[in-house]
Image: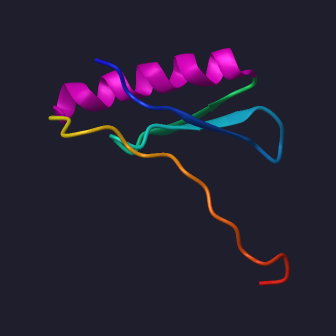
Amino acid sequence: MELSAVLTPAPEGGYVAFNPETGTTTQGETVEEALLNLREATELYLEEFPLSIVGRPLLTSFQIPEHA
């Protein structure tokens, strides 16, 4: 099963990893560690809450004024 991962730099260092299909979130000091932790957390989640995927999330971006 191929799932999505969104990684963002954490303010305290490292990365926060998020899986949009399940909502699982974790962290790691490196990209590799964050992905490994996300894989583990998502596997545990799916053991309890099986997922039927209808489609993949669409990742895009948008802009807002700097002083919003």
Determine whether, in the image, residue 21 is placed left or right of residue 55: right
Residue 32: x %, y % from top left: 65, 15
Residue drawn at x 33%, y 41% is 22
Residue 47 is one of the magenta-drawn residues: yes
In the image, residue 23 sits, relative to residue 44, either above or below, namely below
Residue 23: x %, y % from top left: 39, 45
Residue 12: x %, y % from top left: 83, 43
Quadrant of the rendered structure where residue 47 is?
top left
**Colour scheme employed for the rendering of this structure:** rainbow
Residue drawn at x 18%, y 36% is 49
Quadrant of the rendered structure where residue 21 is?
top left
Residue drawn at x 44%, y 37% is 19
Where the N terminus falls, by quadrant?
Answer: top left
Residue drawn at x 53%, y 22% is 37
Which residue is at the far bottom? 68
Towards the viewer: 36 or 52: 52
In the image, residue 44 sits, relative to residue 67, either above or below, namely above
Residue 35 is one of the magenta-drawn residues: yes
Determine whether, in the image, residue 65 is placed left or right of residue 58: right
Where the C terminus falls, by quadrant?
Answer: bottom right
Majority SS type along the magenta span: helix
Which residues lie in the magenta part? 30-51
